[in-house]
Image (spheres, grey):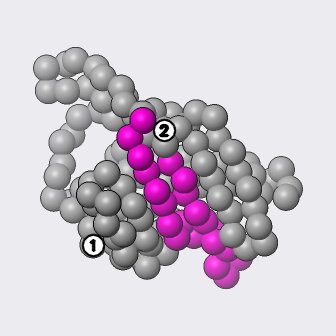
Amino acid sequence: MSDNDVQQLLKLNKQLLDAIDHKDWNTYTALCDEELTSFEPESEGHLISGMDFHRFYFEMNPTGRPRQSTISSPMVSIMGDVALVTFVRIVQTIDEHGHDSSSAFEETRIWQKQNDEWQHVHFHRSIV
């Protein structure tokens, strides 16, 4: 596992979270495999496959409120053309009254090298 690969995966993972925070669907879809799978609190314990479920949160639920994600305690494991990135994600938001709040999630993001490019193929997100 090279340090360059680790740094590239951490950078891609941050770009992915920034795309989510800024509701940047184009960047999100460029980083994700179209068959992306996930387990997340919003899916109520069900495995989600494909991008349609995620599109709702980008296009149908705009808030316009500031939001920022910070990656804490990241670990990267690379196994051939697959990489596992685990971390705690701290999300800071400001509500409509100007009050700030933070929440934390345990995240596992799986990336796969496809045509010499890392693509996000699966994630599991849990509320801390």
| Residue 74: quarter of image | top right
Q: Position of residue 56 (x, y in %)?
A: 21, 62
Q: Position of residue 5 (x, y in %)?
A: 77, 57
Q: Position of residue 101 (x, y in %)?
A: 30, 23
- Label 2 sits on a secondary structure element that is strand
Which amino acid type corresponds to the residue marked 1 in the rendered image?
Asp
Left/right of residue 85 with respect to residue 7 in the rendered view: left
In reply to whether residue 123 is colored magenta, the answer given is yes
- Magenta range is 107-128
Q: Residue at x 38, y 51 (%)?
A: 20
Query: Is any part of residue 68 visible from this angle?
Result: no
Which disc, if any, is residue 52? 1
Q: Earlier in the sequence, mark 2 or mark 1?
A: 1
Query: Is any part of residue 47 visible from this angle?
Result: yes
Q: Residue at x 53, y 38 (%)?
A: 88
Which amino acid type corresponds to the residue marked 2 in the rendered image?
Arg
Q: Position of residue 81 (x, y in %)?
A: 73, 73
Residue extending farthest to the right is: 2
> Which residue is under mark 2?
89
Left/right of residue 109 with respect to residue 63 in the rendered view: right
